Image (spheres, rainbow, N blue to C red):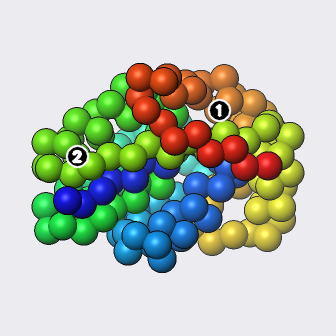
Amino acid sequence: MPTLFLLCGLPGSGKTTLARQLERQHHTLTLNLDAWMVPLFGQHMERRVFDARLAQLQTMQWALAGRALQLGVNVTLDWGFWRRAERETYRQRAEALGARVRLLWLDVPSEVLWQRLLQRNGQGAAGTFELDRNALDLFRERFERPLASEEPEHLQHG
């Protein structure tokens, strides 16, 4: 039975690093929205344009993920999954395809996130958005911590 790994956490929490580990350990296909968004559309765009493009890429990546799961391939969605409703939607979709789901929550203190983002911004890491402190604070406010009922595997990094 294939497994869908949902990586839940804010920018700088270590999701992409964990995704690489999962690739090695569980032979997963990793899908990362930023890795497609930045090369295709660049760093900066209006919010409404960003949201439309993000939705389009999510649809495309889920189609690929769903097919991989049907073929018995493990998949990692390195998307952040900030909202409970989104986590539940993809859990249900994967289970409907006969896959197991593991929600991996990377919980990192704000100051550690900010230091990692500063480093990443300075390196100009490919396939990542440059973020400032205001964006991180806004994202933190919008993030819905997983509930026990979601059965997250709580990973504390930092």
Q: Quadrant of residue 2?
A: bottom left
Can residue 38 be spotted in the picture?
no
Q: Nearer the viewer, mark 1 or mark 2?
A: 2
- Please tell me how crowded label 2 is: few (under 14), some (14-19), or many (20+) other residues with Cα within 10 Å: many
Instruction: List the residue tagged with mark 2.
Output: 94
User: Please, what is the three-letter code of the amino acid marked with disc 2?
Assistant: Ala
**What residue sits 75% from the left and 30% below the top?**
137
Q: CA distance from mark 1 to mark 2?
A: 26 Å
User: Please, what is the three-letter code of the amino acid marked with disc 1?
Assistant: Phe
Question: On the picture, is 63 further left or further right than 157?
Answer: left
Q: Secondary structure at mark 2?
A: helix
Q: Can you give x and y, in whole percent of width and height, for residue 46 in the image?
A: 54, 41
**What residue sits 83% from the left and 46% below the top?**
112
Answer above or below: position of 31 versus 51.
Answer: below
Q: Quadrant of residue 127?
A: bottom right
Can residue 83 be spotted in the picture?
yes
Answer above or below: position of 31 versus 25.
Answer: above
- Please tell me how crowded label 1 is: few (under 14), some (14-19), or many (20+) other residues with Cα within 10 Å: some
Instruction: List the residue tagged with mark 1.
Output: 139
Q: Can you give x and y, in whole percent of width and height, for residue 84 in the image?
A: 43, 26
Question: On the picture, is 114 further left or further right than 65?
Answer: right
32 or 135, nearer to the observer = 32
Answer above or below: position of 136 versus 29.
Answer: above
Q: Can you give x and y, in whole percent of width and height, for residue 57 in the image?
A: 35, 54
156 or 125, nearer to the observer = 156
Question: On the picture, is 62 further left or further right than 30?
Answer: left
**What residue sits 48% from the left and 66% below the top?**
22
For the residues bearing labels 1 and 2, Cβ distance under 8 angstroms: no
Q: Quadrant of the N terminus?
A: bottom left
Nearer-N-terminus badge (1/2): 2
**What residue sits 58% from the left and 40% below the top?**
154
Q: Can you give x and y, in whole percent of width and height, for residue 26 in the image?
A: 40, 70
